Structure formats: C-alpha cells, structure tokens
Image (cartoon, rainbow, N blue to C red):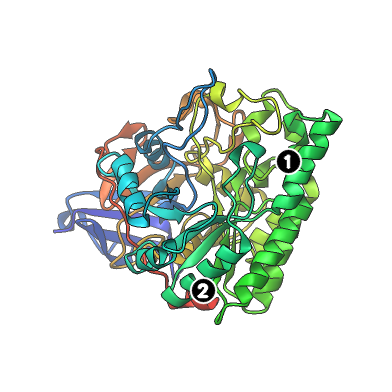
Amino acid sequence: MLDLVIRGQRVVTPMGIGAFDVAIAGETIAAVAQAGTYGAGDTRRLIDAGDRIVMPGGVDPHVHCLWHVPNPDGTAGFSDPPETVSRAALYGGTTTLIDFARWTHGNTIAGTISRRDQDWIGKCYCDYSYHVMIEGQLPPEIFPQLAQAIRDGYPTIKIFTTDITPSRKGRMVDFGDIWEVFQIVAQEGGMCVMHGEDNDIVMHMYDKLIREGRTHFQYLPEVHNTLSEDLSFRRVIRLAQSVPGCAALYFMHVSAGTGVEAIREARARGNPIYGETLHQYLMYTSEDYLRPNGQIYHTYPSLKSVADQNELWRGAGDGTIQTVATDELCCSLATKVQGSRFDDTTGGNAGVEPRLAVMYTEMVERRGWPIEKFVDLTSTNAAKLMGLYPRKGAIAPGADADITVLDPALRRIVRKELLHESDYTPWEGHEVGAWPMLTVARGKVVVEGDRFSATLGDGRYLKRRLDAQVLAGTVF
C-alpha cells in the first residue's frame, strides 16, 4: 500500500513533462508511472492535480537565518530564525534551504558547524544544509580543517573578496589564502562559493563619495559597481585556473553584466565556473532605490542598471547563470529601512516565500520559457551544483518526495498580509500568474491551501558530496 499518489497532466520529471502518477512510499518516491496506473485501492490518499504544474520542491541555495543585523535602536540583533523562514519557504513551495556556518578567529571549523547546529537542529520545518564561511586572515591550522570538513560532507566554502562596507573590516580573505583554499577544494572535491567584489574599488568609492557628501543609499551602485564585479570575478577565475584541474567556483548573487560575461567566458573554456543571481536583481534596478522605502529592494552587492538586468536575464536564458536564489535575510520593515546611508543599509531580503511564484510568472508566463527551464533555475540546478541531486530537485524513483504543485488558477496580487515571514515584502503589489496550492516534504503533505501541517523539527541536515561532473564543469 502506497502512502500517497499525486496524479497530474503536467508533471515535471528529468525526462520531461508528461501525464504521470507520482507514487510515494514513506519519505521517497517509489515510482513515476503513466497517469491512471494507480487507483484509490493502491494508496492511502490520491491527489489529482489535474492540469496544475507538479514540480520538485524548490531549492534555495542562499539564505541567512539568525544572522547578525543591528536593531533599529542600535543594539545587536539577529534576522529571523529557521522556524520562521522554513515555514514561509514551505508555503512558497521551497523545501530545501542552504544557509551558512560562519567561522571566526579562535574557533575550529568543526566547532563552528557544531555551534550552528544549535540554531537549526529541531528548529526547522524543512531540510537544510550549510556552506562553511571563512573570513579575514586565515591561520595555517584552518586549511587541514577545511579539507576534513569537505570529506565530512560540508563541501562548499564561502569566501569574500571584499569587506563589503567599512564597518565590516576583516571579512575579506586575501588572495594568497584564497589560493591555498582553492588548492584544497580542488584536491578534496569541494567548491568555493564566492562573494566577488574588488575591495580596492569598493573602499575607494566609499571614501570618495563620503568626501563629496554623497552618502545616501541611492549611491550604492556607484560604490558596489560593475567594474568591481568585473575585476574581482576575472581575478578569482584566473586564480582558480592556476590550480591543477581548476578549482570549482560558484559566484553568489551575480548582479552585473560584467560578472555574467566573465562567467560565460570561463565556461566557454570548459572551466567549472557557475553563477547564481537573485530574484531581486532580475526584478529591480538601481532606479528602485528612489522609491519610498527604497532600502527594501537592496542587498549586497547593489542593484544595477536596466542594461545589467537585461544581461542577467540573458545569462539565465543561455545557461551562464544556473540558479536564482534569494539571499534571504528575514527581518522587520523597521530594521530593513533603518539605515539611510550607503554604508549602513541592511542587506538581504524577505523573499523565500514568493520566489517560485514570481519567477514562474517572469520566466514562463511573460518570457515564454519552457517550464523545465524555470524548474531548473529554481530547484534542479541548485540541487545538482550543491551535491543534493537526485535526492533533491527531481521527481524520480528513489528521490525524496519533495513536491510542489503550482496552480495557475491562483493568480493574485502579492500582499504582505498573504505571506508568512515579515511585516513587509519587496514584492508588494506584484501580480503573479500562479501560486503553490500543495507542498509535500519527504512524503508529508505540509501545506495544502492555507493549512500548514509541518512539525517543527521535521527538517533534517543534509550532508553533501559534489558530483564529479560538477567538479569537471560538465554537469550542464
């Protein structure tokens, strides 16, 4: 006896879209068979999705839960916890999140992971994983620890090439240490996930604009500019190419056309270089900083021009950009808009819940892209790159039964009152052409309409190992 069968006319599988029965036994998909194969007597429950879109649950490879962010009164605070973000994720059809375990000086990598576990274990509704984040001048003892972490199932290492703002001095890793880390990831089968901006350019522009008295957040694009992304991406790529076999790189939050082109050229050479953009970069530009509460559209690096946005869309369309993430940092509106200067504006966004609906609307409905491409960019490609596929990101026998049903009949205007993660949304007033009406996580129906039935602690940590094709640059 099966536990659940989902029948649909548009089921997105690795072999294409078709009319299938997705048979679920326990937490996994037991079979994907021709629609009508199973009857009511074969399963405890049969859900007929009709012509709705049945897709693998979304995978967001870039979120920040319980992340340091100042409170409006100037005291130290944190973004919202996994409980809040994972609940919103499931309502929005995303079933897997990847956050960060931030190493700081005086600690070990193993200790960093253990401390981060305390924030997550038993406190998350959906499955999750971490990138290991390192920063500043790296002590010699950290390098073998990173190698061991990769072997232990933590294969993605986050590196900054800038301090981002003057107040965050110590975040940047110098290029000698980056070179050492690249050699380790190449040897151990890991990948570096990069925040790529040229620190000299960024800090020069902060100093210059402060001297000129132009410190409003509307000037962020002049500081976190396209030249900075161009120089940093190309320098980092060249460094990766110097390592035997070429270290695998994943550029997070690509925001500029120059970054897209640098990745495109590296991929044309066969290098294992990948790109992620964010749905706010695809939907908003630097002009939106001038709107009321313009901070709500911001994350680091800054929003760029319409021309840059067009290049991001072109990159997503031609395979240069593989994933669309959120850089989720869920906080209140008061916290998000507390800064008025370009060096104190809160980064990140509350965007994990509407991501699938917004991207479906923009990719499929407005641009006419195939549904499969939308699913790749919001689920499957992230699962492949991050060592989760085919357990995640696929409707296939043996995969975890993480399934989202998008309903094009649920056309709506996004309002903060409809969402479940904050008292504001940067997508306020945005019309979407579909909305999730059912989310299944590891075989359990966790969202059905407005009913939420996940249990806190359902989420499990996912140890990962990267596929050889990802490391060789042949996965796509």
At label 2, counting other C-alpha atoms closer than 10 Å, the crowd grade (few under 14, some 14-19, many 20 or more) is many
Q: Nearer the viewer, mark 1 or mark 2?
A: 2
Q: Amino acid at mark 2?
A: Gln
Residue 125 seen anywhere in this rendered image of the structure: no
Say which element carries label 1: loop
Horizontal and vertical percent for residue 239?
Answer: 64, 71
Horizontal and vertical percent for residue 21?
Answer: 31, 60
**Residue drawn at (52%, 78%) of the image:** 472
At label 1, counting other C-alpha atoms closer than 10 Å, the crowd grade (few under 14, some 14-19, many 20 or more) is many
Q: Amino acid at mark 1?
A: Thr
**Residue drawn at (69%, 28%) of the image:** 294
**Above or below: residue 294 compared with residue 162:** above
Residue under numbered circle 2: 183
- Label drawn at residue 285: 1
**Residue drawn at (59%, 40%) of the image:** 168
Question: In which quadrant of the rendered view does residue 413 lie?
Answer: top right
Residue 286 seen anywhere in this rendered image of the structure: yes
